[in-house]
Image (cartoon, helix red, strand yellow):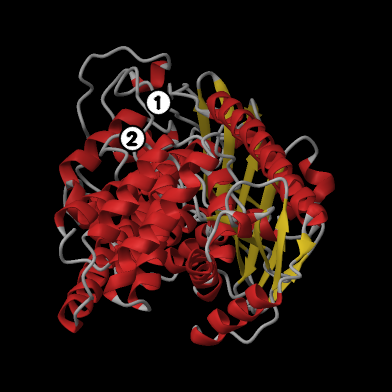
Amino acid sequence: MFFTHFVISFIVSSFTVAIIMLFRKLFKKQLSAKWQYNLWFLLLIALTLPFIPNHLFDFGNYFSWDSHQNNVSGDDAIASAGDHALKDKNWMQDFAISVNRFDLTSLSEILAGIWMIGILVMIALSIHAWLKLKRIKSTTSSLKNKEILALFEQCKRSLNISRHLIIGESPLIKSPLTFGIFKTYVVLPSHFEEWLSMEDIKYVFLHELNHYKYKDIATNYLIVFYQILYWFNPFVWVAFREMRLDREIACDIAVLNSLNKHSYAKYGNTIINFVDRSSRLRYFPLANQLNGSKEQIKRRIERIASFTAETKRLKLKSIAIFMFSGVFVASQIPIVSVFAYEDNHYDFAGEQTVYEDLSNYFAGYEGSFVLYDLQADQYSIYNENKSTLRVSPNSTYKIYSALFALESNVITRESSTIKWNGEQYPYDAWNRNQNLSAAMKNSVNWYFQEVDKRVHRDTIQAYLKQIDYGNYDLSGGITQYWIESSLKISPIEQVQLLKAFYTNKFGFKDKNIQTVKEIIKLEEKDGTQLSGKTGTGSVNGKNINGWFIGYVETKKDTYFFATNIQNESNSYGSKAAEITKSILRDKGIY
């Protein structure tokens, strides 16, 4: 969801800017100019985090609310344990009551549209800036003065720069510029030699060549790229303005480190010379510019005036502060993970798997069907991507809710009745005392919500981790986590858990496994038995998520299945059951 990424990116970028600004202020005297500038590269790293394509981002249930504790999704009538109710043919009917959630879909679409418009505007402005540089390049004429060219080469050698750089002058600029990654230009204003001394020119060359040496041209493109992505965050704009200033100061200090102390004031005066000549400063985001705003020039001159040679101790302290800052920036990774949508896709190895096209059964739905043949030890899967997509289990989870309650001795096979609290529900079958059999048969939500309370959250969490149930996230609340909320599971995981449940892989009490098996029996014909549970997810009056999971026991084999369907308003558990039965029938299984 775009809204998720938008908020994550805003939080991450704003937090990082705040941390860096704080550290710059707190450790101003302990940071060298170079390392104060390097701090901003931590920002570039942090700005990348929300865009890593690892499908880890979602808010789960943080932006949802429920109008009523029990006004939730219910579904299908299930057979009782006493006689298995195999004669009851109404088990596919749906008891679905909508939950109310803040629907962020429209907001996400609006934000995405605004963000894209902003990006397009920023791209247009960047192209305009690039065209201005291209025009400057086209009007740049090569320098002919051999003395100045020799000085330029001398400055290059002093900085150990061997690559060929193009040096020229252009009538379109008032302040020296350096730009171009593959073919680098150092351009000065036309007739600069008429008002600059050779010493001034040397300082200009050293400044511009230091920009080249420290890859500041490439950094300009990175800044522009992230400014395009984060155009909506004013803190990022402030940060990049400060980053550019810190870069100029770091470059100034690098120049001063190569000069003797008698030249410091002269270097500062060289920069001041350009202030009056470029009072209406042009902004070139893709180039390094000697000049800046009067406020920036003032701060640079102050640093030049107070310059002292950097000691080894200062460098060590600067590195330590940088690493300390890096720890704070790295601390945002858990923040990104918290907002992530908890392993939205299950990592399925896919061994012993046949993928097949069953799309004709799913007309009008996005869906998946997973079948596991116990005897052949083979999966058959329709829609590989959807088969690993984790979604809310809704009432299919009641199989495990019942099992956990039995294992915790909150209820027993013989004593499982919970009294109705008198609250009226839209289904008559819900408005009475319930035992486990009746509650499963009629998919009574309030019954399973009550047993969950009695089992307690910590115990449920432990059980979910024990059986590796989907993302085992209970953050949606003890009464709501399985109802279009935080708990999510994929069709493949549903099948794997059913197999583990059926064979009692996790070592639960056999009598409790048998009790649950009995209450989820649905139909029997010709010696073949169908067991399972449907689920319907209804949000804001729309049935968006339909499940049918279970297994078929034949005389020679057992088949485990999970069907999930999704669309905007018509995804029922009963429809998922119809699709499943059609597939099983055509496969000759049931």
Q: Position of residue 104 (x, y in %)?
A: 50, 28
Can residue 213 be seen at all in this image of the molecule? yes
| Three-letter code for the amino acid on which mark 1 is drawn | Val
Rendered location of residue 284, percent (x, y):
61, 47
Q: Can residue 469 be seen in this view?
A: no
Which sits in the foreground, 283 or 405? 283
Q: Where is residue 14 in the image (x, y as percent from the top left)?
A: 35, 43
SS at badge 1: loop
**The N terminus lies in quadrant:** top right
Gap in angstroms between the C-alphas marked 1 and 2: 8 Å
Residue 443 figure quarter: top left
Left or right relative to 584: residue 460: left
Would you place residue 447 above or below residue 277 in this image? above
Q: What residue type is labelled 2?
A: Gln
* Residue 250 occupies quadrant: bottom left
Residue that carries the numbered disc 1 in the rendered image? 72
x, y (%) of residue 520?
46, 47
User: Would you name the residue on which mark 2 appears?
Assistant: 480
250 lies above or below 59: below
Q: What element carries label 2?
A: loop
Q: Do the residues labelled 1 and 2 touch (CB within 8 Å)?
A: yes
Q: Residue 434 carries which label?
A: none
Foreground pick, 523 / 57: 57
